[in-house]
Amino acid sequence: MIRKPARELWKARKRRSPVALITGGASGIGLACVRRFLKDGWRVAVADLRPTPDLKAAGDVAFFKADVRSLPRANAVVRAVVKRWGRLDALILCAGISRAGLLEKAKIEDWQAVLDVDLTGVFAYLRAAATVFETQKSGKVVAVSSTLALRARHGLTAYIAAKAGVIGLVRAAARDLGRFGVNVNAVCPGLVNTPLTDPMPAAIKDRLRDETALGRIAEPEDVAGVIRFLCSGDARHVTGEAIRVDGGQLA
Ligand code: NAP
């Protein structure tokens, strides 16, 4: 028997490994997903505004500079991923921003900015990937919503509306893409330790921690683990779902 050199075998295995595209993968929850999927042998592409040093250190990732608000750019990124690796197995939608502000003082610019990134950004990548999934007859999508979509709080009107919209969009997409064997789900984290929540006052973080059943604030890896599960065969009959990852905060 002629044995292939180890490098050939490694390349052949790599060619078969699944492909994930992660928006917002340069930081926080998205970056934890990048690390987790790489660790599990996936090939990973990231669409984000800029590559961070942490992303560069995470390993072999195809980076696409992209603003998620742009559908033409989403189409180009998805096309490039499929051209490079021949497939797209999972689409993970983490890019997001937040703007605090009471409704009575809210500015339309802030409303629009949050809706554009947090909701239209999810739509753009779902739309761009839908035709690939239809052709493949397979695919997994996970979008990051928030517990705030399930129980509102003071002073976050646009963010809460956008995150509730993500759950609606996920359900609609689960219906539209289900016939192609595609699973579309959302995760709803409570407070997670990421650069997004760094500026939050410690007293508020302590209060939110005390509201959880587990008495802890989530790390990005806690959310990445659930996203990874939703992209696995073990979750093949789960679709149109929004799973809380909140340490029992809303239990
Ligand atoms: P993060 O660390 O700030 O990561 C978000 C990433 O999205 C950043 O790399 C950011 O780039 C990128 N991004 C922002 N606007 C973008 C745009 N227009 N186009 C492309 N990329 C863009 O925040 P995170 O906490 O990991 O949040 C990830 C997701 O989880 C968000 O959807 C957030 O709403 C959601 N979430 C977070 C928490 C929490 O407590 N952290 C709780 C519930 C839900 P820049 O850093 O360069 O702006």
Image (cartoon, grey):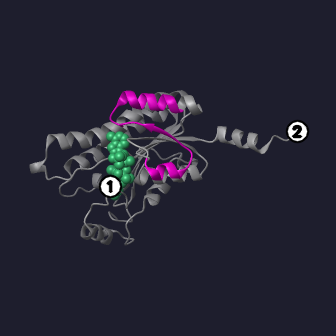
Judge whether residue 46 can be spotted in this image: yes
* Disc 1 target residue: 196
Going by the picture, which residue comes out furthest to the right?
1
**Ligand 1 is within 8 Å of the C-beta of the residue at disc 1:** yes
Q: Amino acid at mark 2?
A: Ile
Q: Quadrant of residue 28?
A: bottom left
* Disc 2 target residue: 2
Q: Residues within 10 Å of mark 1 (few under 14, many from 20)?
A: some
Q: Residue at x 59, y 31 (%)?
A: 86
Between residue 93 and residue 180, name the one nearer to us.
93
- 210 lies above or below 240: below
Instruction: Write down the region rendered in magenta.
Output: 52-81
Q: Amino acid at mark 1?
A: Leu
Q: Residues within 10 Å of mark 2 (few under 14, many from 20)?
A: few
Going by the picture, which residue comes out furthest to the front?
53
At mark 2, the secondary structure is: loop
Q: Residue at x 10, y 49 (%)?
A: 105
